[in-house]
Image: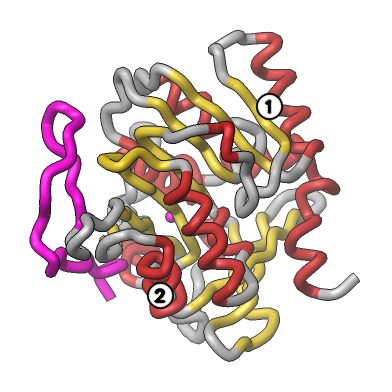
Amino acid sequence: MNDDARVAGQYEEIGGAYERFKSLPVSRCVEQPSILGLFGDLHGRSVLDLACGTGFYARHARALGASRVLGVDVSEAMLGYARNVEARQAAGIEYLAADAAALPASLGAFDVVTAVFLLNYAADQEQMTAFFRSARRHLAADGVFLAYVMNPDFAFERPWPAKYGLEIAVERRLPDGVQASATADFDPPMTLRGFVPARRVYEAAAAAAGFGALQWVPVRAEGGTDGEFPAGFWDDLLSNPPWTMLRARPAAPDGEALQQGPHGRGRRASASVPSVPAGPSPG
């Protein structure tokens, strides 16, 4: 199996075991509060969750008030876990097995399209553009695309503290980025792999798909339960965060971005929407 196929097929092997990653401090205290903060208030909005996996964030979207949630994933093993949870704890979430880059047109448009780690399975510019085009195709004209990705600016050469329970490493260098792995300190260890493209790859894909300027949104850290971690525990991570987030809105006909108004209506934004730095120094 070549490296690209190994990245694409890894979830068929781990299935529901992927949920164990959500118990790691870096997920509980960084990934989850960052993503849920990015989601914001979803009351009355329809959500398409691309690469939904076990349905973890699809369930959160529903809990945040989304009127409809459709989770899409290419892995039947991951969807099997999600559907089992839905059968036990019905939340009205729909799931579909499909390639996120080639969704049926019949799905229609959604107010919010989310993609947690999806974009890190794009091995090249063509695949990245296909993911962005799919998101745009199924996004309402005044909707928003939200993504959590491995940070293009993460400094792999800097020491990464073992205290976070996750080892991050470069597996191979690519013309426009790297292929990286993240290994959780479980027994036995569990490794996930993905691609970390340069910022220009994301920005070119967004423009080609019909989005306005990308906004890079930094992750944040919340300390966990009272007394779980000492003061400054997350400082090393926040000074070199492995993850960052993206927000993109459809471009208006003149090339400007549309911003979401307070009542769900699109309003025109300045063409020079500033990019938010991906971290103090990297969802």
Q: Quadrant of residue 191?
A: bottom right
Please identify the residue farthest to the front as the structure is shown. Answer: 253
Q: Earlier in the sequence, mark 1 or mark 2?
A: 1
The residue that disc 1 covers is 82
Q: Is residue 210 magenta?
A: no
Instruction: State the separation of the CA atoms marked 1 and 2.
Output: 33 Å
Q: Is residue 162 left or right of residue 37?
A: right
Can I make out residue 153 in this image? no
Q: Residue at x 63, y 88 (%)?
A: 173
On the question of residue 7 being in view, the answer is yes
* Residue at figure coordinates x 11%, y 55% from the top left: 269
Q: Which residue is mark 2?
A: 204
Quadrant in which the N terminus is drawn? bottom right
Q: Is residue 270 magenta?
A: yes
Amino acid carrying label 2: it is Ala
Find residue 172 and report its image quarter: bottom right
State whether residue 156 is above or below residue 18: below
SS label for mark 1: helix
Which stretch is magenta? 257-283
User: Could you tell me residue 272's position as x and y percent?
Assistant: 12, 69
Q: Give residue 211's position: percent from left, percent from top.
A: 33, 59
Whole-percent x, y for residue 243 in the image: 44, 62
Q: Which amino acid type is shown beneath numbered disc 1? A: Ala
The residue that appears at 38% across and 37% down in the rendered structure is 112
Foreground pick, 185 / 143:
143
Residues tagged 1 and 2 counted as in contact (Cβ below 8 A): no
Q: Residue at x 62, y 87 (%)?
A: 174
Note whether 54 is above or below 207 in the view shown: above
